[in-house]
Image (cartoon, rainbow, N blue to C red):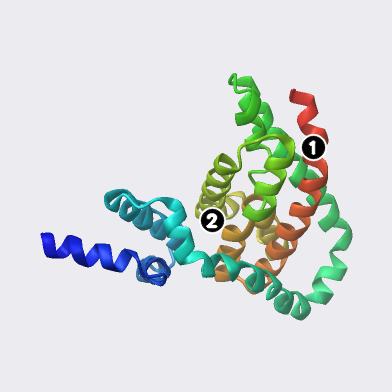
């Protein structure tokens, strides 16, 4: 037991340990997802998060220590987002033809995402910093954290809510849209991108490229619109 403790103490000081464990956790999650036949509730991100959270807990490792080792994954979010331009270019004609309904859906979807969570939370007695932290829950994490800071929310709480929103969206979007009889991949993708940002977008690409393209557009435009609208909409609840 002493030898294992010494080995872990040594490994924990190595900068690539947490990056390696993050990749292993995701590979395990992705393997489980593929083995299940692509079941949406077997979400690789959720599995990886649970595994890593458990490992951090049992090893008493501070999050900052983990992030220092795994921040390369965070850095790659930028290039991954830019890479969404490739399917956008392939489906540009579809996007052009859908521009007007797309923008209308964006305004309605973004407004609903913000006002619904604020309204429900307010009705349940939530006020102050916690209420403000919920407003940007459907936006990709870097933007959501920045918006939360600017309006007086808690960036840490916002980050947690954003991840939960993304994972839940990725899990329930496909069966919910199937149940509602929505077959248009453009509508399905846009809805997922607006509601559950990057994690939902990744799930949309697993289902259909057109859906993934519109999910990426929804994610990006929703981030822009939310950053502009949230500071004004939260005034209704203050």
Of 22 and 164, the residue lying toward us: 22
Q: Residue at x 61, y 71 (%)?
A: 208
Place of residue 101 in the rendered image (x, y in percent of width and height, measured from the top left): 84, 56
Please state which of the two labelled residues, at mark 2 or mark 1, is closer to the viewer: 1
Residue 24 drawn at (x, y percent): 36, 70
Q: Is mark 2 on a helix, strand or loop?
A: helix
Residue 124 falls in image quadrant: top right
Residue 7 at x, y percent in the picture: 21, 67
Tell me, for residue 170, which label it has, or none. 2
Q: Quadrant of the N terminus?
A: bottom left
Q: In the picture, residue 84 is in which quadrant?
A: bottom right
Specify the farthest residue to the left.
Answer: 1
Going 57% across and 53% down the picture, which residue do you hit? Answer: 173
The answer to whether 233 appears left or right of 164 in the picture is right
Left or right, 101 with reference to 159: right
Q: Nearer the viewer, residue 148 or 162?
A: 148
Residue 148 appearing in the image: yes
- In the rendered image, the quadrant that contains the C terminus is top right
Residues 182 and 112: in front is: 112
- Disc 1 on helix, strand or loop? helix
Nearer to us in this view, 11 or 132: 11
The vertical placement of 3 against 196, above or below, is below
Residue at the image point whose x is 75% and y is 80% from the top: 90
Q: Which of marks 2 and 1 is nearer the N terminus?
A: 2
Instruction: Point out which mark residue 152 bears.
Output: none
Q: Where is residue 17 in the image (x, y as percent from the top left)?
A: 37, 69
Does residue 226 lie above or below 102 as drawn? above
User: What is the tally of numbered marks visible in this picture?
Assistant: 2
72 up-or-down from 178: above or below: below
Residue linked to disc 1: 231
Residue 136 shown left or right of residue 19 in the figure: right
């Amino acid at each position: 037991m002493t030898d294992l403790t010494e080995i872990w103490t040594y490994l924990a000081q190595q900068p690539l340990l947490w990056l390696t464990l993050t990749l292993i956790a995701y590979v395990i999650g992705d393997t489980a997802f593929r083995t299940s036949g692509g079941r949406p509730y077997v979400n690789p991100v959720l599995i990886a998060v649970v595994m890593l959270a458990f490992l951090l807990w049992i090893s008493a490792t501070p999050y900052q220590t983990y992030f220092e080792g795994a921040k390369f994954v965070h850095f790659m979010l930028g290039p991954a987002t830019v890479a969404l331009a490739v399917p956008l270019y392939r489906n540009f004609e579809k996007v052009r033809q859908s521009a007007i309904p797309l923008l209308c859906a964006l305004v309605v979807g973004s407004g609903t995402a913000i006002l619904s969570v604020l309204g429900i939370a307010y009705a349940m007695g939530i006020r102050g910093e916690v209420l403000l932290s919920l407003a940007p829950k459907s936006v990709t994490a870097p933007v959501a954290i920045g918006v939360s800071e600017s309006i007086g929310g808690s960036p840490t709480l916002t980050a947690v809510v954003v991840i939960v929103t993304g994972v839940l969206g990725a899990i329930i979007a496909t069966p919910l849209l199937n149940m509602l009889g929505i077959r248009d991949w453009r509508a399905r993708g846009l809805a997922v991108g607006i509601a559950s940002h990057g994690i939902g977008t990744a799930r949309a690409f697993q289902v259909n490229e057109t859906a993934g393209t519109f999910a990426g557009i929804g994610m990006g435009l929703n981030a822009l619109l939310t950053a502009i609208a949230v500071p004004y909409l939260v005034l209704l609840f203050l």
